[in-house]
Image (tube, grey):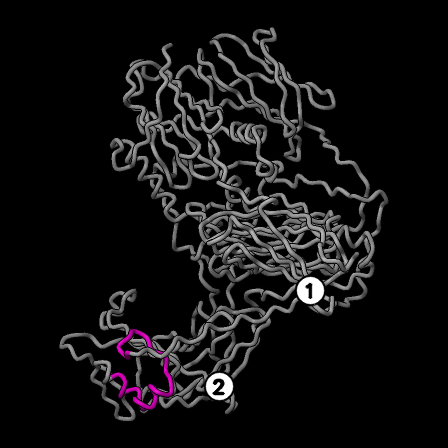
Amino acid sequence: MKKIIIALLICCTSTSLTAQKFIDNKLVNYFENDGEVIFTHLNKTHFIKGETIWFKNYLINRKTNFLKNEVGNLYLTLLNEKQEKIEEAIFYVKNGISFGQFEIDEDFEPGKYYLYFSTNYNNQNKLQHLNHQIPIEIIKKIENKKSVKTYTAIDVQILPESGYGIYDFLHRYGVKAINEQGIGVAFNAEVFKEGKKISSFKSNDFGMGAFNLTPQKGKNYTLEITTENQEKFVREIEGIQEKGGIISTHIQKDYHIIKISQNLNKEGFQHFNLLIHQAGKNFEVDLSKHSQGQELQFKLPINNLFTGVNTITLFYKNKPIAERLIFRHQDNYIKKADVRIKDRFNEALDSIKFSFSIEKLENKYTNLSASVLHQNSIANQPKHSIISKLLLSPYIKGNIEKPNSYFKDIDFKKQYNLDLLLLNQGWSRYNWDAILNHEIIDVSKREQGINQELFFLQKTKNFRRFFLIFENMINEDEVFDLDKTKKIETNKIFPIKETTYSFSTFDKKGKHYPAPKFKVNTLINFPKIKLHAEKADYNFKPKTQQQTEIKAFENGELLEDVIVKAKATKEEKKEFLSSLRGKKVEVTDELADSFPLLSDFLRYRGYRVTDTGSQFIIRPNIPQTPPPQVIINGGRVSDLSVLSNRLVADFESIEIDKNGLGQGMWGAGGVIRLKFATHMRNLAKYQKRITEITMEEGYTKPKAFYTPAYIYQNSNKFQLIAGLHWEPEVISNNGDFVIKMKNLDFKNYKFFIEGITDQGKLISLPINYQLKSNLFD
């Protein structure tokens, strides 16, 4: 066969062949409304009774590597080792970030558990592989046991590169041996043809290896492997076809060497397309110009790839016939050597401030979280970092053993082992039937807020026309017109569990009254969870020689918070606009003096206003233009009599949008948005004309970090298991950030830092650190 060596020809979509445009459009459309990759950073993975699990969730768009702003709700399901549901909760997501905690009380027995974080969008659109399943362990004893891979059965899989082999073509075959827990078993192997040995090879530590073979039709090929404990297994080498196309790759410095072989068209590569893609992003390698031969080979620069897993798909007449996964590492990983740390005690010597500086993060906004343990700790053995969870996990079927290891101290061996992992995948997890059949992800399943029903148990007097829900931690003031309604359905309250919410009614003149009796029905559709095949691949590895019984807490006694985080301050009001012709104005004394009544200000802004004291009518000056719609504190109001004789000083802000953009036909005449001033809301409280209800269901409220009252705080046991500090909100604007914690009289610390920049760069840093301050000298 004649082999053709070609240079890489990358074609933009606009210049691709018609057939390629068809495939490209299908792929882009399928991923247009992709789900969110969820990465959860825990403060640690091993706990004892009385501790709290602290966590932060990053919800990321894998197409852009940016935090995903469209997500509102995040679900947590806690399951035991038998996959029985123990607890469930819902957390509020803002700008792609959510954080919270879960307490381990006395009802939890020692053993393995699973935290499963998911969104309704992922669950309903069959995107569960983007969720995050985390194994944790509640322990009672630390035992000095050597970690040994045990198994009663071995699953040996032979996986031809790109899905299958073809007779008479040299091809690479992956081999994977795993035990019943999904953990790789190392082996030595020999390949036989008609009973005669023709080659041998050895697996890596993860039980994966590969060999080359040119199969001949009518010949029998077998593989014999010998495991670490000298058990032998023999398997037939199958997956060989008479016709088809195959992809082979190997790494050579800064290139992937790609080889394409096929016997479907003897005249060359007409009707073939090669697409390299990732989550909807793609480019084409033009094969059409090579009209001779059945094999070709080219160099693909790694820098041309997308960061993370790339899928190479070979198409013949618009049908995918072979697929291979390859990888590109993120540029300039942040390493320990890139981090400068300074420490300083406060004057009272009861707290320490760690100042971090990372030059590679200069001119970047970075959102981070940090867990602090003792350097001797064995309590944190996370399976995934934010890097492996985003760049690797979404594209791999089944268990990945020690995924973090592929991103530490990267050398040729690490790259080779990662390529072996991808080789042993066969086809990617993309569903080409769904893609080519134009199945679209259902955007309507995106959740924002929690659905609630408010049932009124008594009639409302006619003059109490408006029902007001006062703003709280998440929601803004919300106004509803009570005319002819006994029930309000809304998802704009954003209820926080165990938080008190305030309600009232008011009349057309703005006078408040207590709300009528009502009950609240909170509708939270917790997902049904089935754990996937991913297994915990860590063992609890003690650094102490003795068996230790853990008894860490006195009866429920807790210490004060290590750091009491200040409540988020509201953004300061914008300065009074020099021109009142702006879209939105903040009400000041100057404005209120200039325009005492709201009707005066609206006339100044170009409206014709009629205010009779019982009626309030707004008309535009332009003939045949519909009247503007009015929104008060976030709610649409049709009866404007509530605005009669209303003072400008009664409002915090007045926004006039004469275009009504984003409101559809409803906003054809423009929109006027009014927000009552704080004193108006407080007035109802002062007059005791307010109803307060504590929500029993809703979002779990994040708490400030605290450490429990460990009995043996100065012991080795404390160093081994305790969580010293947790910071979910660490922000760096220019590569500098600070972690402040209680002084526990230790000299050696270990920081686990995870995060993402506003440019999509991922950070995962485990850092050992010894205090430089002289307190311990």
The answer to whether residue 137 is left or right of residue 292 is right
Q: Amino acid at mark 1?
A: Tyr
Q: Secondary structure at mark 2?
A: helix
Near mark 2 (Cα within 10 A), the count class, few <14, some 14-19 or many ≥20, is few
Judging by the rendered image, the residue that carries numbered circle 1 is 706
**Residue at image x 24%, y 81%?**
605
**Residue at image x 52%, y 39%?**
392
Q: Earlier in the sequence, mark 1 or mark 2?
A: 2
Residue 274 lies in magenta, yes or no?
no
In this view of the protein, can residue 459 be seen by the observer? no
Q: Secondary structure at mark 1?
A: strand
> Viewer-proximal residue, 413 or 318?
413
The CA span between labels 1 and 2 is 33 Å
Near mark 1 (Cα within 10 A), the count class, few <14, some 14-19 or many ≥20, is many
From the top left corner, tell me how far across and down residue 281 is, in percent.
Answer: 38, 40
The image quadrant where one finds the C terminus is: bottom right
From the top left corner, tell me how far across and down residue 453 is, in percent.
Answer: 47, 71
Judging by the rendered image, the residue that carries numbered circle 2 is 682
Q: Which residues are magenta?
A: 579-602
> Viewer-proximal residue, 103 or 250?
250
From the top left corner, tell me how far across and down residue 524 is, in percent.
Answer: 52, 62
